[in-house]
Image: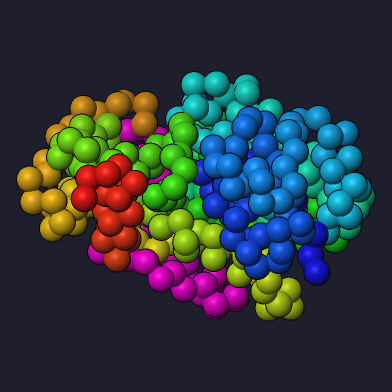
Amino acid sequence: MKKILVTGAVGQIGSELVMALRERYGNDNVVAAGHKTPPSKELLESGPFHYINCNEISSLQEIVKKYNIDTIYHLAAILSAVAEAKPQHAWDVNINGLYNVLEVARENKCAVFTPSSIGAFGPSTPANNTPQDTIQRPNTMYGVSKVAGELLCDYYHKRFGVDARGVRYPGIISNATLPGGGTTDYAVDIYYEAIKNKRYKCFLKKGTFLDMMYMPDAIKAAIDLMEADPSKLKHRNAFNVTAMSFDPEKIAAEIKKHIPEFEIEYDVDPLRQAIADSWPNNMNDSAAREEWGWKPEYDLAKMSKDMIEVLSKKLNRK
Ligand code: AKB
């Protein structure tokens, strides 16, 4: 049985990934590691949890040895808007943290999953049907750290044989943990506000198309890629993966089908708008589909129905 460590386990993806991995591989075989108290008691109590800082390599070493870890899902990262506000901190967490994880993986022969992002692309990348292999000249610290991370993972695979794999996630939408500090976060906030107040003030302007994905598909992508036959992987790291592309008007129209009184208005944040404008409108994810069978289950309609049902119950609005 696999012995897994998940860093960033209290974050948006990490907290749900830990529970999915525990269900699949057994509670005791999945060690969750985060730098703050988990939002859910379930995560803390269903299996091992440790406070670690990926910038301290000794704390990573200790856990990997203690539990005989063979696979690390490295989710600890700073998202785009926060990274622009604190670029030095973002470099430290996104690059030095990843470097430590790869070093520990090299020494202990662990496989590593690391997400890159649509943020690894920039204004000179073709914005529509963005190819798997294309121009990557991002103009944000988040993007710079993601491209460097992709290259570092490729390097550790080629040079040291570390089984490093990863995807370029789009914006991730979840009905459980909230995202923090991203440019695509509006696509989560909009559901909460639609249910609570029937209005949402959007910080991106209409016409800003971005790739998005519902959390169950994001979790599936990570697990499926790590379970894929390595002989079929030509790319290994940084696979484009997407499930849908929409702008604020399109998601608002979908929400209106369930909450007819809902209205969207705009108060554009120049920082996040500039970041979003530098990212693709929609990516081509055919390499992931061909090499390891990637196929999302949720489109905008199916995701919206589920989000509204689950959140309405959670917020006692039904
Ligand atoms: C962000 O908005 O920063 C993230 C991402 C797309 O990587 N959700």
Number of marks in the image?
A: 0
Q: What stretch is highlighted in magenta?
A: 273-301
Q: What colouring method underlies this structural image? A: rainbow
Give the image location of residue 273, x and y in percent: 32, 33
**Residue 173 visible at all:** yes
Left or right? Give the position of 227 relative to 260.
right
Is residue 67 placed above or below 143 in the rendered structure? below
User: Which of the 4 quarters of the picture holds residue 1?
Assistant: bottom right
Q: Which residue is drawn at 46% across and 73% down?
A: 295
Left or right? Give the position of 126 relative to 220.
left
Q: Residue at x 44, y 69 (%)?
A: 296
Give the image location of residue 151, x and y in percent: 69, 49
Is residue 56 placed above or below 40 in the rendered structure? above
Q: Residue at x 71, y 64 (%)?
A: 26
**Residue 127 visible at all:** no
Is residue 182 placed above or below 249 in the rendered structure? above
Give the image location of residue 182, x and y in percent: 44, 36
Left or right? Give the position of 115 relative to 277.
right
Q: Which of 161 and 202 is in front in this view?
A: 202
Give the image location of residue 257, x and y in percent: 13, 58
Left or right? Give the position of 131 relative to 189.
right
Q: Nearer the viewer, residue 257 or 271?
A: 257
Is residue 232 placed above or below 89 in the rendered structure? below
